[in-house]
Amino acid sequence: MNMLSACAPVIIAGAGAAIVGANVVGSSVDSKTNVSDKSIQFKAISLLNDYPELTGNSNVEPVVFNHILLLIGQVLTESLKAELANRMAKIPGVKVVYNQLTIGETVGIGGYLSDSWITSKVISALISSGVNSLKFKVVTEKGVVYILGVVTKAEGARASAIATNVPGVQKVIEVYDYVLAPQPEPTSDIEYSTIEKGAA
């Protein structure tokens, strides 16, 4: 667990919970990727309809960003938790599944409203700090904030640090797809000299 200088701990998602998908795709977030993400999410939600035992007893939310699928919520058994993640990893276009489902009772309406409020405050904090919030997707479950993004390590660390200082945040879990920072243009190696007129 990586601690920043803030109130809440920061954890990297996927320690023993990541399942590689069958179809790896590019990592750039553009309009084509956004359309693909929506298709993945639709298929993931449709897959949940195959499990009538989830109705009224469980709360599963598939969150998709840049072909990364994050599973949050509550289910009744460990076997169901594992089965859902394995099936969703086979959805075309999924790069990796981070299975963050927990075993236990579902979140009530009060908890849902509280989590929604925390999400709004985190996004507002990012924007007010000058962070490009379009690079991130934020979702909260039981006070735990999940931040997904296609970012440099510096951008990710800054966003996580900001989120940890938001009141109500119990923990921040990073689900980052890291990219390299833009490199400066190379400078020319040619050396110039000045010759004064008549100095021959």
Image: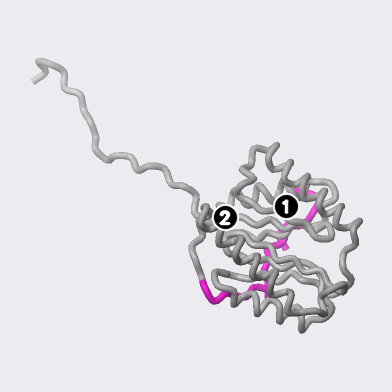
The answer to whether residue 150 is left or right of residue 14 is left
The answer to whether residue 50 is left or right of residue 23 is right
Quadrant location of the C terminus in the rendered image: top left
- Above or below — where is 200 with respect to 47? above
Quadrant location of the N terminus in the rendered image: bottom right
- Above or below — where is 172 with respect to 17? above
- Above or below — where is 56 with respect to 113? below
Residue drawn at the location 33% of the way across and 40% of the way down: 187
> Judging from the image, what secondary structure is the residue with disc 1 in?
loop
Label 2: how many Cα within 10 Å (few below 14, some 14–19, many 20+)? many
Q: Quadrant of residue 11?
A: bottom right
Magenta range: 1-23
The answer to whether residue 16 is left or right of residue 197 is right
Q: Across the whole image, how many numbered discs are drawn on residues?
A: 2
Mark 2 vs mark 1: which is more N-terminal?
1
Would you say the magenta stretch is mainly helix, strand or loop?
Answer: loop
Residue drawn at the location 79% of the way across and 54% of the way down: 8
> Judging from the image, what secondary structure is the residue with disc 2 in?
strand
Write down the residue under mark 1.
4
Q: Position of residue 181 (x, y in %)?
A: 49, 49
Q: Are marks 2 and 1 in contact (CB under 8 Å)?
A: no
Q: Position of residue 70 (x, y in %)?
A: 68, 66
Residue drawn at the location 69% of the way across and 51% of the way down: 160
Write down the residue under mark 2.
150
Magenta residue check for 5: yes
Residue drawn at the location 68% of the way across and 62% of the way down: 63
* Mark 2 to mark 1 CA distance (whole Å): 20 Å
Q: How is the image coloured?
A: one colour
Q: Amino acid at mark 2?
A: Val
Between 10 and 3, the residue placed more toward the observer is: 10
Q: Choose mark 2 or mark 1, whichever is in front.
A: 2
Magenta residue check for 32: no
